[in-house]
Image (cartoon, rainbow, N blue to C red):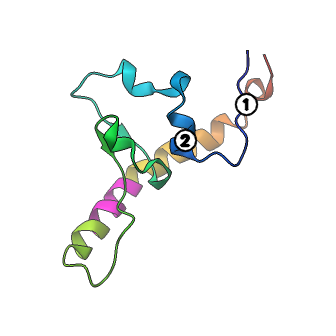
């Protein structure tokens, strides 16, 4: 059975549905890397998320900006793979 989520659901809202709780299959020493749409994921499992409150007046601004850039360096690889996968015909089949 294919599950379809309507566009008004945000990422963390969809993740919190029982069938999507990936962290149930992870060990305590494993982490989930996600984008800002998953704010709050840290309450469920160890998560690595970009800082969203990067304010130039913040004393940790440079460290947060550096972390976000470092994380983006790796996330772009994942996003590019997702983009390629979406072009595969098998991904358009409804089961």
Number of the front mark, 1 or 2: 2
The residue carrying mark 1 is 4
Indicate whether 35 appears above or below 16.
below
Query: Along the horizontal axis of the image, is 13 left or right of 59?
Result: right
**Residue 56: percent from left, percent from top:** 31, 82
User: Which image quadrant for residue 11?
Assistant: top right
Indicate whether 56 appears above or below 34.
below
**Residue 35: percent from left, percent from top:** 45, 51
At 39% across and 49% down in the image, what residue appears?
A: 74
Q: Tell me where the magenta segment starts and ends, as one range.
A: 66-72
**Residue 86: percent from left, percent from top:** 69, 37
Does the magenta stretch mainly form a helix, a strand or a loop?
helix
At 51% across and 35% down in the image, what residue appears?
A: 15
Q: Is residue 67 magenta?
A: yes
User: Which image quadrant for residue 59?
Assistant: bottom left
Total numbered circles? 2
Q: Is residue 48 magenta?
A: no
User: Which image quadrant for residue 33?
Assistant: top left
Under circle 1, the secondary element is loop
Q: CA distance from mark 1 to mark 2?
A: 14 Å
Q: Are marks 1 and 2 in contact (CB under 8 Å)?
A: no
Quadrant of image for the N terminus: top right
Quadrant of image for the C terminus: top right
At 41% across and 56% down in the image, what residue appears?
A: 72
Query: Along the horizontal axis of the image, is 35 left or right of 62?
Result: right
Q: Name the residue at the bottom extreme.
A: 57
- Please tell me how crowded label 1 is: few (under 14), some (14-19), or many (20+) other residues with Cα within 10 Å: few
Query: Along the horizontal axis of the image, is 91 left or right of 84?
Result: right
At 70% across and 25% down in the image, what residue appears?
A: 3
The residue carrying mark 2 is 13
Badge 1 or badge 2: first in the primary sequence: 1
């Amino acid at each position: 059975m294919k599950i379809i989520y309507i566009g008004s659901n945000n990422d963390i809202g969809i993740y919190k549905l029982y069938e999507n709780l990936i962290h149930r299959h992870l060990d305590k020493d494993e982490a989930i890397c996600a984008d800002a749409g998953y704010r709050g994921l840290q309450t469920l499992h160890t998560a690595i998320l970009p800082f969203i409150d990067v304010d130039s007046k913040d004393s940790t601004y440079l460290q947060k900006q550096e972390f976000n850039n470092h994380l983006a360096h790796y996330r772009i690889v994942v996003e590019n793979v997702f983009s390629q996968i979406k072009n595969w015909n098998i991904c358009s089949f409804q089961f």
